[in-house]
Image: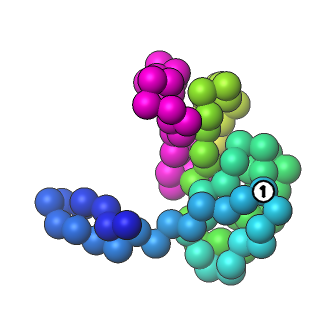
């Protein structure tokens, strides 16, 4: 899927990884909060950019101290009517 950046469509090079999937070296990955907690140092050493995926049940406070090291925070909306991520 393309992203819009500076009013132009650009390729989306982010890879959403499952918790058990290997992270391709040098890639841009989005991982769950649980995986980020478990493998934070390993991810930082092997990938180019790290994003953390938060669900409505997660607390933003869990990543507050690391926001300056994260390249992306992705908020999930499991259903159209589930707006919990809007209050994060």
| Vertical side of 63 occupied by 44: above or below | below
- In-front residue for pair 9/69: 9
Residue 9: quarter of image: bottom left
| Vertical side of 28 occupied by 58: above or below | above
Label 1 CA crowd tier, 10 Å (few <14, some 14–19, many 20+): some
Percent position of residue 31, x then y: 67, 54
Q: Tell me which residue sits at (62%, 34%) in the image.
A: 55
Q: Tell me which residue sits at (17%, 66%) in the image.
A: 8
Taking the magenta stretch, the answer to whether it contains residue 70 is yes
**Any part of residue 25 in sight:** yes
Q: Mark 1 points at which residue?
A: 19
Q: Tell me which residue sits at (35%, 73%) in the image.
A: 11
Percent position of residue 78, x then y: 55, 36
Q: Residue furthest bottom?
A: 25
Percent position of residue 34, x then y: 78, 44
Magenta part, dominant SS:
loop
Query: What SS does tag 1 mark?
Result: loop
Percent position of residue 13, x then y: 46, 72
| The N terminus sits in image quarter | bottom left
Q: Tell me which residue sits at (72%, 59%) in the image.
A: 18
Residue 7: quarter of image: bottom left
Residue numbers of the magenta segment: 67-88
**Any part of residue 45 in sight:** no
| Vertical side of 46 occupied by 57: above or below | above
Q: Residue furthest left?
A: 7
In this rendering, position of residue 87 left or right of residue 29: left
Taking the magenta stretch, the answer to whether it contains residue 23 is no
| Vertical side of 53 occupied by 79: above or below | above
């Amino acid at each position: 899927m393309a992203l819009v950046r500076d009013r132009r469509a650009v390729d989306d090079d982010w890879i959403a990884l499952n918790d058990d999937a290997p992270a391709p070296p040098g890639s841009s990955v989005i991982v769950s909060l649980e995986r980020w907690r478990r493998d934070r140092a390993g991810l930082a050493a092997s990938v180019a950019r790290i994003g953390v995926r938060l669900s409505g049940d997660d607390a933003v406070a869990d990543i507050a101290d690391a926001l300056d090291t994260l390249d992306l925070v992705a908020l999930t909306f499991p259903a159209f009517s589930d707006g919990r991520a809007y209050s994060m």
